[in-house]
Image (spheres, coloured by chain):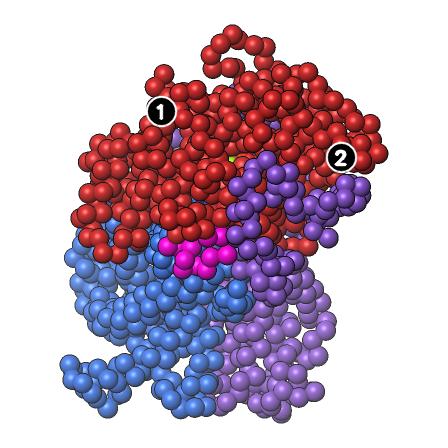
Amino acid sequence: MRFFLRRGLFYVITFWAAVTINFFIPRIMPGDPVRALIARNQGRIPSEAEASLRILFGLDQDTTLWQQYLDYWALLFRGDLGISFTYFPTPVSDVIAQALPWTIGLVGIATILSFTIGTLLGTGIGWRRGTWADSLLPISTFFSAVPYFWLALIAITIFSVTLGWFPASGSYDRSLIPMWSWEFVGSVIYYGTLPALTIVISSISGWILGMRNMMVTVSSEDYVTVAQAKGLSERAVMFGYAARNAILPQVSSFALSLGFIVGGTLVMEIVFSYQGIGYLLFTAVAAKDYPLMQGIFLVITVAVLIANIVADIAYGILDPRTRQEG
Amino acid sequence: MTLTTPETGARRAPADDPVLEIRNLSVDYGYDDDPVHVLRDVSLTLGRGEVLGLAGESGCGKSTLAYAATRLLPPPGLITGGEVLFTGRDGRKTDILRLDDQSLRESRWQDLAIVFQGAMNSLSPVYRIGRQIADGILAHRPGMSKADAMARAAEMLELVGISPDRLRSYPHQLSGGMRQRVMIAMALALEPQVLIMDEPTTALDVVMQRQIVEQIAELRDRLGFSVIFITHDVSLLIEIADRIAIMYAGEIVEDAASLDVYQRPRHPYSSALLHSFPPLRGPRRELTGIPGSPPDLAKLGGGCHFRDRCAFAWDACAALAPRLTAPDVADDDPRRTTACLRHEPERVAAAGFEAKPVPAELAG
Amino acid sequence: MTIDTSIVEESEELAKPSQAPMTGVVAARGRGGFGRRRAGGKPPKFLFMRNSKAVAGLVILAFFLLIAIIGPWIAPYDPSARSSDVLQPPSWQHLFGTTHLGQDVFSQIVVGTRGVIIVGFVAGILATAIGVIIGVTAGYIGGLGDETLSVLANVFLVIPQLPLIIIIAGQLPSVGGVTVAVVIAITGWAWGARVLRAQTLSLRKRDFVEAARANGESTWRIITVEILPNLTAIIASGFVGTVAFAVLSLITLSFIGIGNTGEWNWGTVLYQAQAQLALQRGAWWWFVPAGLCIALLGMALTLINFGIDEFVNPRLRSTGVNAKSLRKRGIRPRIGFTPVVRETDAPRTAIAPHLAEHTEPTDAARPADAARPADAAASAEAEASSPTSKGARA
Ligand SMILES: Nc1ncnc2c1ncn2[C@@H]1O[C@H](COP(=O)(O)OP(=O)(O)OP(=O)(O)O)[C@@H](O)[C@H]1O
Ligand SMILES: [Mg+2]
């Protein structure tokens, strides 16, 4: 239990830190573009929304920093992230809520696929060390070194522009009305295939290499040899003993590298003009829509934290040592 | 002492009814052009129901021998020659080194089980010990139900003196001694005919060591399997082994009944090894270490590998490699062997060296 | 983290008292665990340089460093200069073709190398410095300070870095290369700190550090003289990793249009290509070379880190020979099934004769002898010239 308590506390701290960073960034930045924007839109911004923006970006010089901080938290608890400038006057939270499911669907599914397939491949390569399987290593090294978005450019060139198999951008056929129909869902899958595939291909090599190295390390543990000595089947030894132990560090590195992967996949959305959080962040950056940028950062952090908690629970289930009392 | 000592236990003749014969086993480490020849033509026979002790300094290749005989040697180990004949209860002989993967898997654990050096890491940390004992049973008894396998596992735990409700424990919840005994229980679960134990007691305190050794001796008497017991500790071997083989630098240098080794060592190394351990009973004798250190197996030359540390070496030792032969001492057990040129006067003379007699210390 | 375990293990091995009784029968020869090859007294430096992966990585890295230095002088054109050769595919005039404005892509990449390398190295050095200070301090002081610093590092690990970099860089009024490097360093130090902390923690418990402390040496001296030298490999690997991360981050930032687009780097080339619809126009030469350069540089850094990893964790080291030659000899390195290779695989005598032979234990021809040459003199010669087994089988 202590393991989970500690981890729980850690996540609370991380959440607090992320919010605090978000609070301070606009306050330490030179100049205040938000003030300028408010001034430019004088009268068009509802007074309540303006108040939120003042709190979010620290425009009220007459209140203490501490008071600003408290107000900031109060805003967050109300789910008020200010209003977006680009989608004026839609609240940031609404804009994000629209985009979030797309990202969770695309990035979530692709990441889980990539982790699963990569871990399986890594298991095989690590187990058959010194055979042809090793020749996969240089290939995956190459793929782990290229930026995700560049691979996306190549994928579009080949599969959309040249071969015309998949659409180059968008997330569904614009002539369809979003609803739960076969046609619409089919279109979403069709549009999502190429981005998902690109995410899988570009992130998979990390999992392959990580699992391969862990398999090599774990394979020299005595318990694997003991499992062989018991005359268990090859599969039982490889999966039940070697991979079963090698997966533990793999899961913790999943948790740790999630932030990195999410960052990379967000850029992928930009290339595919996929209407998720990443694309939104891109438009926000281009339009200098600071409230939206801040809101997106917070939401991404929370999403990554939740994914981390899931990974931690998985780890706790996989490793009995964490469940130990005391 | 409740131990089966060589005096009380029936002395079994090893060669009459062998269960495991290792012949000319050679092992290299390294797949490159310059491997280390760790074992060179090692031969060893284990009789049915016998406890064979294997002793020697650290790094002399005891574990390598045990792992190679079971083909469990990890990379970069390579078996470069020899055979390991296992004789089943029906008298059929199979060469373990020539078995295909499937037959080897089937043979493992039923015919021959092994307890590894440092049982601390021999259990997977993520499974309950019950499961780890049971899966070995189930792999060889396909018809058996999981519940039966668990019941068998519980029985085995009781046998080694651990309460059956420990079946649901994870390895990290057990003490070192308990883990060691779990490993022994696991190895005995299928009543194998041969049990190889690689220093099963080194990590334990003296009390625990004694307990485990007694347990093994008792189980052997009850279940009638054969044991190869590996340790540095010669005095421990004299307690439990019927026969002792002494290894030095990747070769067997002496192989004799344990009382013979203890009271009448024929090889200078055996004698030196004995004198570096306190005797178990009888008058205390002076302890002396062995001068120098074992040779680097990667840089072995010809001749006798012990000669640099041997009090009885002379120029023949640098040129001729001793072979395992019956000692050149009258009235010795004809089955015992030793590899020392002092016991091979004819061969030394034939090679043109001065033949020297067996020194009094090694002829007693 | 593989690094971590292996060193801890080694330390245990060193610290473990000899298992022999006090008489010293067991000479202090390390326990030479399985699967591990002894370094055999070779100086580690050369071992690292003998690692072909590391050498390949260093050569590629050196190439890019050279381009970064001399780039502006060897570039055939001004990267921003327009010409009438619009959207030309690669030719001898324009090795990587031209952009929609007739700019030479090859020159853009050559000139842009400097920006990439500077940001990568500045960020790498800064982040490594922060990582060393925080990691080593945490590992060395322990207790509450350690807890606090570890949580800090873990927080920075969990917070998604790229979005953080984007919101920081996006709010800065002007973003030059060095600013980007500083932002990357501030967000990217945590990984190195984490690994260093674990390592310092295990080093601190080692005998030589304990001894230095008992001798009353100053903390500063212990850290700089006893601990830091032992962390070299990990610091190096952290540095290389951070450089790779920084290069990727810079390029990503440039690609999404954050930063000074007037400053050429590979990311801005890609940004232009994407923004000017190079894909739709089929101008593959516009974005392929930049990506390959990134991949090549990234690969070089990864290879160097592989080299360091294998240097620190010998278990990862390949078995010294390539898979092909192993296959030729019929060796398949496997756990639990040691390969049996009889180099002179003459059919041995059948089992029956052995049996017969064995029923007469007094027979002088015991198996051990049977395999050896009968002639003593010949055997003596053979054995003196080469290791026994080879000689005996020759
Ligand atoms: N991977 C390897 N490469 C090269 N030599 C090795 C390797 N593993 C072990 N050795 C060498 O093989 C020899 C035999 O090792 P082994 O483990 O069999 O000794 P041992 O007699 O069991 O020692 P201990 O009593 O310490 O367990 C040692 O000299 C060791 O240095
Ligand atoms: Mg051993």
Residue A95: % across, % down: 24, 71
Q: Position of residue C343 (x, y in %)?
A: 64, 57
Q: Is residue B264 above or below residue A31?
A: above
Residue type at mark 1?
Glu
Quarter holding ligand 1: top right
Query: Which chain has been coloured red in this picture?
Result: B
Residue named by callout 2:
B347
At x 43%, y 70%, the residue is A202
Few, some or many residues within 10 Å of mark 2 (<14, 14–19, 20+) = some
Chain ID, purple in image: C
Q: Residues within 10 Å of mark 1 (few under 14, many from 20)?
A: some
Residue at the spot x=80%, y=41% of the render?
C377
* Residue in the image at 76% along x and 34% along y: B347
* C305 sits left or right of A286 in the view: right
Where residue C379 sits, quadrant-wise, is top right
Tell me which chain the residue with mark 2 is part of: B
- The secondary element bearing badge 2 is classed as helix
Q: Given the image, on which type of amino acid does mark 2 rest?
A: Arg
Q: Residue at x 70, y 35 (%)?
A: B322
Give the colour in which the image draws chain A. blue
Q: Is residue B305 above or below residue C280?
A: above
Q: Nearer the viewer, residue C188 or C177?
A: C188
Q: Main secondary structure of the magenta part?
A: helix
With respect to residue B117, does A140 lie above or below?
below
Q: Which residue is mark 1?
A: B214
Magenta segment: B94-106
Name the element at disc 1: helix
Q: Picture coordinates of residue C276 (x, y %)? A: 48, 84
In the image, is the residue at mark 2 within 8 Å of ligand 1 by its beta carbon?
no
* Residue C182 rendering spot, x and y as whole percentages: 50, 55
In the shown orientation, is residue C376 left or right of residue B38? Answer: right
Label 2 vs 1, first from the N-terminus: 1
